[in-house]
Structures are given as C-alpha cells and as structure tokens.
Amino acid sequence: MTDLAEPAPAALAEPRTRVSATLTDDAHLIAACRRGEARAMEMLYHQYKRRVFGMAHRIVGGSDAEEVAQEVFVRVFRGLAAFRGDSALSTWIYRLTVNAALSHLARRGRRHEVGDEGLTELPAPAVIERDSALAARIETALTQLPAGYRAILVLHDVEGLSHEECAAILECRIGTCKSQLHKARARMRELLGPGLDERSSPKP
Amino acid sequence: MTMCDKIRPRLTAYLDGELADEHGSVVRGHLRECPACREMARDEAALRDGLRALAPVDPPAALWAGILARLAAEEVADARKPRWRRHAGRWLRWLRAARFAPTMPQLAAAAVVAVAAIGLLTWRTHRSDDAGHVVVAPPLVHPGHGPAPVPPATQAPAALHGDVTEELLAEPAQTTASYARVIEELMKLAEQDSTGWSAEARAAFNARITGLRDAIARAGQGHPSHLAQSSMIHYLQTALAREDGLLAAGGAQ
Amino acid sequence: MIQGRALARRALIAILVAAAPAAALAEPRAGAAPPSREGPAAEPGHTAGASERARLTIEPAGHAFTRLSIENPLGDVKVEGYDGTAIQIESHKFAPDDDSLDRLHISLVPNPDGTVSIKTAVDGGKEVRPVPRAAMRIDLVIRAPRDARVEAEAGSGALEIANLDAGGDLDTASGPIFVRNVQGEVLTHSVSGATRLVQVFGSVDAQTLASDVDLDTISGERLVASVHRGRIEGQRVRARYVELTTTEGRIRLEAEAALRGHLVVSSLFGDVNVQLRRHGAVVVRAKGNKVDLGAPARPQPDGWVESSFGQAADAAAATAALVEIRSPRGNVNFAIIESRP
C-alpha cells in the first residue's frame, strides 16, 4: 500500500538530506534578489525580460525600448527591498514598465497621457499600406495611436492580460480599462480602414 | 438613438465574451440584421486577433549587461550619498512610480504624509531584515535545516470558477467515482446471474461483498481507495466468469 | 565526499543553465516559441506560451534513498533508475503566460526515513484570471537510485518507470502507464490509461477500467491483470501464477508453462486465446460459449471440458501445470505452440 500521507512534523524537523539548490519560485526569487544573489537576479530578469522589453518596444518604439527596459529592471532590483507583495510581482513589474515607457514618451516631448486628452494630439494618420500583411499594418497603426491607448492595447490585446490585471497595472478602475480598450480599438480600426477581415487570414 | 448607437459601445465587451447572456443575445440579434455593425464586429475581431498574434520582440543580448552596469553605478552613487538623501530618493521614486505629478502646494501637503511613510517603510524593511527575508508565499523547497514549512502542495488551493484549481479539486473524486461505477455495473450483472447460484454460493458471495465494501469505506480517498475498489472489481469479474459465485482457488486477493 | 562535492557542483552548474525560463534556453527558436502568446508549439503536444525548466539534485546524507513518492496531477512523471545515489529531478512547467506559470508549484520533502516526496500543485492566487485545466502542465523527469521503490500518482499525464530494482506502485486516471525493465513488485492502476509492461521480473498486478493492458516478457512468481472494458495482450509470459481477467474485451496470451504453474484466464464477454509453450505436462480445463483445445477434450461436470498434454503419468502427478480458461459468453481457443522435452 502506498503511503502518500504527509511526513510527521517531527520527521521534518531533522531531515538528513542536503538540498543543493532550489527550483524557481517567486518568493525565493524575491528574497534572494534582496540579498543581492546574482543568480537569482538573473533568473528574475530572464523570467520577465520578454514581456518588459515587448511592452516597452510597442509603447515607445524600437529605438528607445532598450533604454526603457534597462530603466525598468534597475528600478525593479532597487525597489525590491520596498516591494511588500501587496500586488503580484508581475503586476508591479508591468506597472513599472508602463510608467517608465509613458514617462519616457513624455520626456521625449510627445506629451501623450493615458486618457482622452491624447485624442486631441493625434498626429495626422500616416498612410498605412493596405496590401502589406495585417501584422505589419497593425504595427504601423500602433505607432500612430495615442500612448495611453497603446498601453491598454499592448497589455490587454498583445500580452493577453485580463482587465483586472490591466486595471491593477494602470491603477485605474476596471470599467475605465474596458472603455479605454473600446476606444483604443475603435481608433485602431479608423487608422486601419474598413475591411480588415477580408485581408487578414480568412476565417474558417 | 439608433440601435447601432446602442450596440456599438458594447461590441468590444461582446467580442471578448464579457457580456452576460441576455446582453450578448441582444448584440448577436442585432448583428444578424445589421450589415454595417456586422462588418465592424468582424473588423474588430480581426484586429484583436491580429494584435494577439503579433510576433514577440526579443530583447537584445546586451540588455542584461547594461542593467548590471547601471545597477553597479547607482550603488556606488548610493554609497556616497548621505543617509537622508537615500530615503528622499526612494520617496521620490515612489511618487514617480505612482505617476503622481505634484504641484507645489501638493508637495507641501505630501511632505507631512511622507515623513510618516518613510518611517513606515524603514520599519517594514527592518522588520523584514530581522526575519531574514519577507516571504510572500511558502518556499518551494525546504533547504534542509531548521523547522520545515508545510509544502505548498499540501495546502488546499482556493478553487476559482472555471479555473484549473476547480478541476484539480474535483478530479480525485471523479476517479474514485469511475471505480464505483464499474463496481455497480458488475454488481448488476451479479444480481442477474446469482438467480442461478446455489443458496450456499449466494451467501458466500454476499459475505465477501460486505467485506470488500467495508474495506473500501475504510480506505477513504485516492490511491488506497482505488486499491480497495480494484480488489472488489477483480473479485466480481472472477466470480461472474466462474458462474457460480464462488472464487476459484488462488483467485483475486 | 569529494565525489559528492563534485556532484553538487555539477548540479549547481546545471541549475545555472537550466533554471532560467525555457524561453531563454531556447534562444535560437525563441521567435517561434515566445512566452505568453499562442503560437507554434514549444514542445510537441503543447501549444501554450510560457514554459520553464528547472533542475535539482538531492544528495543523500546519512543513508540511502529507499523510496520515492510522487504526486503529479498536472502532467507526466518519468522515473529512471541509475547507478548513483542522488535523486535528480528535472521539471518542465507550461502555462499560457508568465503569470499563470508562476502559479505552478513543486514541493519536495526529503524524510529521514529515506523517503523523498514530490508533489505538484497550482495555487489559487488572488489576482489570477481563470486558466483552463489543459493549459497548465508540469512534467517531471527523475533519475533515482536503482534500488529505490517508486510510488507515483498522476491524472491525465503519463507515468513511466524504467531500470528499477525495487518495483513501483503507479496510479493514473486517464494517463498511460509504461513500465520497462523493472524488478520487484509492480502495481499499476488506471481508469482509462493504456498500460504497458515490458521486462518485469518479479510480481505484477495491473488493472485498468477502460483501456488495454499489454504485457511483454514478464517473469516471476505472480502476474495478475484485470481489465473491465478493454483487451489484455500478453507475450513471453512466464510466471508461476498467472491470472488475466476482463469483463469485456478479448484476451490473448502467449505464455510458457512453469512446472506446477497455474494459469487462470477468464473473460465475461470476450474471446480468450491462449498459446502455451510447455516444458512438462499440462492439464487444460475450459468452459465457454465455444471451446477449441486443439486436442480431444473430455467432458466434465457443469459444462467444463478438459485435455491433457504430455506424459499421462506426469499429467496425473502434482508437477503438471494447470490452465483454466473461462469465457461464459465468448469463445475459447487453446493451443500448444512448441513443446520441449
């Protein structure tokens, strides 16, 4: 008969085996990063680098993405001591990412803000090639979008985060998040023009 | 306000499956009748799918080295800064992170709060230093010294509707139920067959079944239960194949 | 000691390489298998986005590991015995995105009695959005000392053990079971996972409710297999006591009769086909819808028929092997395929 019951606490108190290392885990990672362990920091970096860089890339554009991502990770490692775990580590990191990207744009002088204010500053839409692949057209249209809209589209549609996560990252209400997404998509449709569906991969 | 004006603000939520059934069916009904809204919905769905399918962008290999270099530079700068400026820096960063653009009067008002906030932060940090580190979740692997934490796997996960945790919680019971269904299937067959058995054979069969059922009840859940249930299944199969309710010598044990 | 340290150092290096998310490991094809988005499969059978690989080595201190207990409702478990003393665990987690990936946990508790237990779980989290069952997965590949006994439970994942000397106890819901080159007592239970045992030396007890059992090269004291709905296929079987039972589903057995051996093969609704290599005398008793023993059969009470093979004196003696075949509603076929003196 298999005995899969938990070992008695007494047995646990004096294990005679030596564990040479740990499998990855957020709490461990945070604690080890706080202690300044290089391996843990590198693990945390690898765990989040794609999303952080991806978000930065799509919000500020390719040329400045590296600078922003670097800024984010520096803030993450220096801020971990004060990170109290009242949101998920990922939420906190993505919040730093979006904020760093948006303030980078602000510094660059584009003055885009989250919200409707951005609408009035919309640059004249660039001519978006109708024949190119949908992905390329979408990428081009994204660059034409107000930064706030870009943020919500990147978080929700590109990265696939839920409205709850987006709201936590953008520090707004879920309702605001949803209406922003609706407006952002509407603006994208305007930029891309009608008949998106026919040119994209045909539906089965 | 036309029907289209009412429908269009809801289109995003509808396409993302966030509308309750009755609202969903209103939108669906309108889309069936209105070609313009239908095209808009198709376009938005195509756009959403297109965004989701965008190729990921890979960070350059040099990014990590850049981060390490900047961390090192900032740490050196930290060491040269007086203590109060380190706290102020943290506080300002926190304000910036909160996207709080302070005006002068706001800054003055915030200063009072900030003193308290710094006190709190410092205290918290100290507290966590005392404890070694702050653990927001139980550690994965017990390092092998000191009192061991309860491994996370032993904690009953909070089930979330439609989530993996919900199904995981239900699975052991489903498996046990599969065994129970087979037992009942075989018991039905045995009831039909037993009409042809001798009274002695029926009595022996019933006694054995009672014993096996008791063993299953004692076994509880999971693997021990499967072992007990499988013994009963095996016994029933053997008894049925023999057609007289009595076990062959050396049969299921 | 030196060797132990060397092992630990090697393990550390392994972690440095392996603990980074698999996306980082798979750099060359990273574009094709990005984390957190749907796309081309990162692994065969997995279409999800994020994945993570980690490796861990536990060295024994004091005394050897004797028992390995694994519960993984989230994916596959593969345990392979080897000539070392440490337990090496490689985990591979899969989730639709990084956040969900963070919800997957593995716990490991080494006990002073020589047991190591490994369990996997998904935490409920707070700010999580529901993730479908099929999108979350943890696969475990473990190398364990040959003489440790393995006890493993899985759900829909596959259980596989190989090259072990102290047997195993395996239980799955719908996942397949595969046992290869194992000595000792082997127990397998599955609701609907196909079960296959190859080269088992010792005793076997295999049961499924709704899937097939395949047995190849099984020898030892005792082989018991029971299937409710599904077939049993056995070849190169040589055990002193063999008992194969199905409710529905045919049984085909190619076995070697041991001296004084006892084979019981029965099905309620399925056909039964037994081919026997014999060494000494064999007595076959059978009962079924239609019975063919390949030799003249003597009718017995209650509808049984009987045939003997080999020397009459041997058949009467206690050394004869006894074969009992029953299939009340199916057909029975029996044949001696090759007799040796």
Image: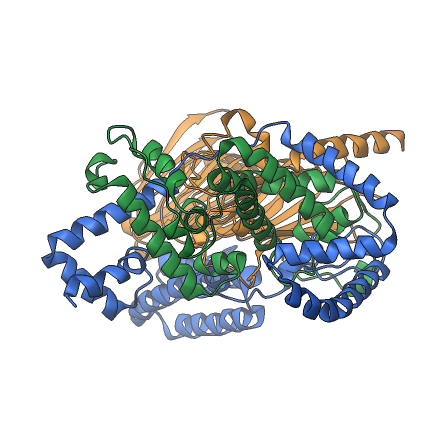
Instruction: Give left or right: position of B219 versus C236.
Output: right
- C279 or B166: which is nearer to us? B166
Output the letter for the chain in blue: B
Output the letter for the chain in green: A
- B95 or B7: which is nearer to us? B95
Vertical comparison of C234 with A162: above or below: above
Q: Which residue is painted at 75% across and 39% down in the image?
A: B71
Q: Which residue is painted at 69% across and 68% down in the image?
A: B110
Where's residue C89, x and y in %? 67, 40
Where's residue B207, x and y in %? 48, 74
Indicate the colouring scheme: by chain
Which quarter of the figure is the C terminus of chain A placed in?
top left
Vertical comparison of A171 with C70: above or below: below
Chain C's colour is orange
- Which of the 4 image quarters holds residue C122? bottom right
Where's residue C329, x and y in %? 27, 53
Q: Quick one: which residue is furthest to the right in this view? A: C1
Which quarter of the figure is the N terminus of chain A placed in?
bottom right
Instruction: Give left or right: position of C136 versus A123.
Output: right
Q: Quick one: which residue is furthest to the front in this view? A: B104
- C67 or B119: which is nearer to us? B119
Vertical comparison of A176 with C44: above or below: below
- Which of the 4 image quarters holds residue B139? bottom right
- A126 or A9: which is nearer to us? A126
Q: Is residue B77 visible?
A: yes
Q: Is residue C298 visible?
A: no
Instruction: Give left or right: position of B78 versus B168.
Output: right
